[in-house]
Amino acid sequence: MPTATPDFANLKSGLKASWIAGDFGQIANFTAAEAEKFVQRIGIAPGARVLDVACGTGNIAIPASRAGALVTGVDIAPNLLSQARKRAAAEGLELDFDEGDAEELPYADHSFDVVLTMFGAMFAPRPDRVAAELVRVCKPGGLIAMANWTPEGFVGKFFQVTAKMVPPPPSVPPPVLWGDEQTVRQRFSNTASTLNLVRQKAQFKYPFTPKEMVEFFRRYFGPTQTAFSRLDEAGQTALAAQLESLWTEYNTASDGTTSVEAEYLDVRATRAGSMI
C-alpha cells in the first residue's frame, strides 16, 4: 500500500535546499540588531542552558552567549552553521552548533532552561511537531520564546506575494500562522502554564532602492531564489514587479534607500509540568 512518506521526504529535502541556497548571512546582517533587542528583552540569566532553534548564522545565539548563557544552536543548513561558528570564534565565544531539524531536535527531554527561535522554526512544515519539540527539550518551568512574522505585517505580505505566484504544497500550513495569536494559543494550549503574546515592530534599513531590494533578496534569500527559479521568464518579471511594488509601498525612506517596519509576534510560553 503506497504511503505519503516519499513525498514528505522530498518536501523536506526541498525546504532544506532552499535555505542552503543563496547566502542567508547577507540577509541576517540586517536583522542582527533586532535579534539583540529580542535577547535583551528576555533577560537570560548567566549560566542558563539555552537552545536556539533554526539558529541560522547565530543572530540570537551569539548575544545570548555574550550574556553568559551556555548556548547551543541547531539548524538544517550546514552552510549557515559554518558562518555561525566563524562569527562566534571571532568574538572568542564558546557555543555548540549542531545540524538538526526543528521537528526532530537531537536533544534529550528537559535539556534546556530557555528555548529560543527567531524567524526560524516558524518555517518548518509541521507546526504541531515543532511546538511539541520546543516543549519537550525545555525544562518544566522553563521559557520558550519565539519571534514570528505576522500575516498582516510587511514580511507576511512579502511571503503572500510569493505564495500566490509559486503556491506551496497544500498540506503545509502558512508559516505566518505562527504570528497569529489564536493559532499560537491553540498550539501551546496543553503544554504552557503561561503564555504572553506581544506584537513588536522591527525597523529594517537597507542601502538599496526598492528595485534593488528585489534583486538583493533574489540573490541571497534562498526561498526567494527558489521561487524565481520555478517560474518562466514572464512569471519572474511579474513576481519582481509585485515585490518591487510591495517594497515601494512600505518604504518610508526618501533618499534612495529602503526602510521598512516589519511586525512580528513575540511569544513567551512557560513550559508546564514538573520534573517529578
Image: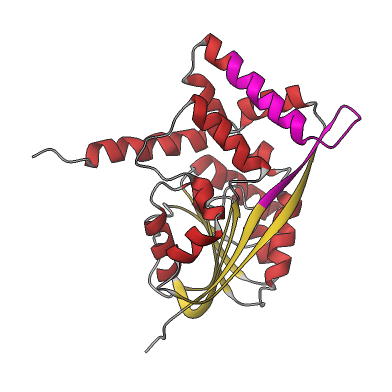
- Outermost residue on the bottom side: it is 276
Is residue 211 covered in magenta?
no
Which residue is at 74% across, 53% downward? 201
For residue 41, above or below residue 166: below
Of the pair 6 and 96, the residue shown nearer to us = 6
Left or right: where 87 falls relative to 180: right
Which quadrant of the view contains residue 44? Answer: bottom right
Of the pair 63 and 173, the residue shown nearer to us = 173
Which quarter of the rendered picture does the N terminus lie within?
Answer: top left
Which residue is at 72% across, 28% downward? 213
Q: Is residue 226 visible?
A: no
Is residue 243 covered in magenta?
yes
Which quarter of the rendered picture does the C terminus lie within?
Answer: bottom left
Which residue is at 68% across, 50% downward? 263
- Outermost residue on the top side: it is 233
Left or right: where 78 falls relative to 203: left
Residue 33: image location, x then y, percent? 76, 52
Please report the bounds of the magenta region as a residue range. Answer: 237-263
Residue 140: image location, x then y, percent? 46, 80
Of the pair 199 and 85, the residue shown nearer to us = 199
For residue 208, above or below residue 241: below
Left or right: where 23 falls relative to 164: right
